[in-house]
Image: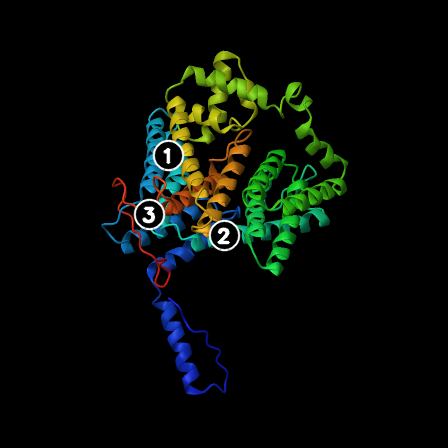
Amino acid sequence: MATEKVSVTPLAGLEGWKALGRQRQSILTRHPEEWIHWGLIAFIFLLPFPVFGPDGRNIVLYLLFIAWLIWRRSGARLSRDQASVGWALLLYLTVAGMSLLVSADVRASLLDFQRVPLNGLILFLILSQEAGDTRYLARYHLALVWASTLITLYGLLGYFLGWGRNGGMVTSVYTWKNELGYLLAVSVSIVAWELLTTRDRVRRVAWALLAFVQFALLLLSDTRAALVAVIVSTLILTVALRRMKVLLVCIVAFMTLLAVSGQRIVTRHISIVQPSTYVAGDLSGRVDLWGGTLAMIRERPLLGYGYGWRLFARRAQAFANQTADARATSAPHAHNLFLETAYEMGLLGVAALCVLGGTVALVLIKRCRVSRSGDESSREMALLLLALYVVFGVISLTDYLLSDRLGALGWTLFAFAGALASETPWHGGTEKNVAGPPLFDASARRLPGRDRP
């Protein structure tokens, strides 16, 4: 709802105060869906902060879900691509629910289940009502960027003042460097996308400075997987958006930062391209860990040991006591998305994960292939989501990101893809919101004044 901007001074008179009253009334009577939208912005802004724990996230998200249930409109259907994402999500949740039955600690597994993948379903349902409005999705991404910026500034301040470190590596508000590195990998990719898509010169300079600062802290965090993920995602964005000059500038900036970051950081990051790291090295103990995890999976290949990464260390120790194979006891999880999924949910879980991931990737690729004469903003948003999808995919090769705080970010990405899918062309056409198989009773309403022709 558009509202007039009113500036009231002591000399404005009665009419000025009446106009201010009308503006306040319009805010209070704003459409409930817009309040849900701003609630989601607050949720995503708070997501990276450790003080906003899983219980806080659940309370906020459940309140938003209740509001959505109250004000949604019945009778609407999801688009075909939205329904595909929804069915894939339900398949994953079904297999995860089946794995709860074989868990040695059902309560712990249930906690992990409702804190992460169930939240993904709730986000998918809420976002489905926005029918792929890219302005909404852009605001959600900006909320994450501003939160990451605050964490970045805190981390840089701690670096120069000698606190906010762990073993010489910058951790900012976290206890371990990887959490900071993975968050910055997501944020830097979003900032790079903003830099590549904005047409305003002043904003372009501002985004470039922010990208430089966040990337500098990423290097200081010593997180190699995050660095590789950012390089790959930025390469995808610059090539897809045809900004090769920006790519050259990024390469020069990267080499400059690396050159002045110190011998320890240079040595660690250069090891990414050294063959000895993969041939003779053990990837920081991951090779033995993966071997031990595979041995555990062979014992229970169908449904695994029960959903939830928190049970991994306990089950690995029990397995070591039985078989004298202690390789999997060196970490709290398998440090690989597919191995961890196979451990928790068996081969059925891996199949469900592949269906979900493949469906989301297909939807995003279809949206990216829309002609430039069509909805360019929607295509650009799809490119960003695809780049973030690649970030999570690259990091997931050596870590497990579908758990706790980072897991919430991953499931949020799936929900964003589902929201954007409502405008994905079907069979090469340009129809929007084509009715698909009934799945959820989701609302497809737009906010007043935001309908597109």
**The quarter of the displayed image where residue 205 is located:** bottom right
Name the residue type under label 2: Phe
Which badge, 1 or 2, comes first in the chain's sequence?
Answer: 2
- Going from N to C along the chain, the mark reached first, 1 or 3, is 1
* Rendering coords of residue 452 (x, y %): 37, 58
Residue occupying image coordinates x 56% and y 39%: 236
Residue 263 in view (yes/no): yes
Q: Label 3 to label 2, Cα distance in Å? A: 33 Å
Residue 166, which numbered label? none
Q: Residue at x 35, y 48 (%)?
A: 128
Q: Earlier in the sequence, mark 3 or mark 2?
A: 2
Relative depth, front residue between 434 and 66? 434
Residue at the spot of label 1? 110
Question: Which residue is labeled 2 in the image?
Answer: 45
Q: Residues within 10 Å of mark 1 (few under 14, many from 20)?
A: some
- Tell me if 21 is positioned left or right of 175 in this view: left
CB under 8 Å between discs 1 and 2: no
Q: Whole-Å distance between the Cαs marked 1 and 2?
A: 26 Å
Can residue 164 be seen here? The reply is: no
Q: Which mark is residue 431?
A: 3
Query: Element at badge 2?
Result: helix
